Image (cartoon, helix red, strand yellow):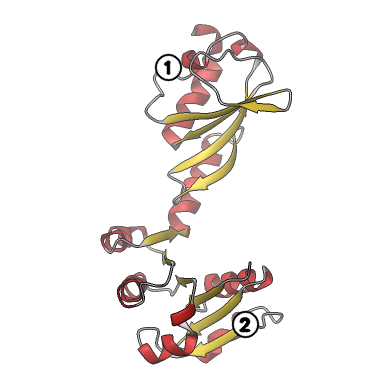
Amino acid sequence: MSMKFIVIGCGRVGAELAYRLFNNGHQVVVVDSNKDAFNRIHSEFHGRTVEGEALSADTLTRAGIANADGVAVVTNSDTMNAVIGHTIRTHYPQVKQVLVRNYDPAMREMLEAFGLQIVSSTSWGAERLQELLIDASFRSVFSAGNGEVELYEMYIPENWTERAVSTLLDGCTNTIVVAALTRAGRAELASPESILKSGDILTVSATLEGVTALHARLQEGTEA
């Protein structure tokens, strides 16, 4: 289903986002105060561009804010993103989704104080890099928020055969939630009493602290 989106800020992130949305069949309008910024957009983008200040009601009206399904505010200023996002949320409540970009982690609390939905490429990227540096053997299949909680898949080694899930999670229950257990290609919801087999795939939702502790448990294996 085609939706109508406004991307405010045509830097590298805004230009890439606008092209991706357009390429997926959506109607996209890009707003920036500098018309030269639109040169960053992919040549195959055929959405609209609107030059003007995003805090101007006239600019937002020309961008089609009245009928927009969602707005992404991705300028290079965290303060501006917060103000624009808050203004849209306050004056255009019909917009279903308002997302704002956070660049400087030190400004994140300020953005959160506005009650805005935040995407922080810096925080997410740092979290992911930390995760891979510490242990690249666990496969992350989904990231929630800015990487604070992720969904992981991991293979159960031979030394954990015939042990219960509860034994594996001992000491990690506050940082890990088991989502599923897959055996021979068939997935099922796992309970603490579920018995593990070598080659099983355990899918868990966990913080970095939790998945690090779980990896340590799997390495201990014979001790538990």
Q: Earlier in the sequence, mark 2 or mark 1?
A: 2
Dot 1 alpha-carbon crowd within 10 angstroms: few under 14, some 14 to 19, many 20 or more: few
Q: Quadrant of residue 93?
A: bottom left
Q: Who is closer to the viewer here, 84 or 37?
A: 84
Q: Position of residue 75 (x, y in %)?
A: 43, 75
Q: Which residue is mark 2?
A: 47
Q: Residue at x 30, y 73 (%)?
A: 90
Q: Who is closer to the viewer here, 211 or 116?
A: 116
Q: Residue at x 65, y 28 (%)?
A: 187
Q: Quadrant of residue 202?
A: top right
Mark 1 residue type? Asp
Using the image, determine if residue 202 lies above or below residue 26: above
Q: Which residue is mark 1?
A: 170
Seen from this angle, which residue lies furthest right?
184
Question: SS for tag 2?
Answer: loop
Seen in the image, is 197 located left or right of residue 177? right
Q: Position of residue 198 (x, y in %)?
A: 67, 15
Q: Residue at x 47, y 90 (%)?
A: 62
Using the image, determine if residue 90 lies above or below residue 155: below
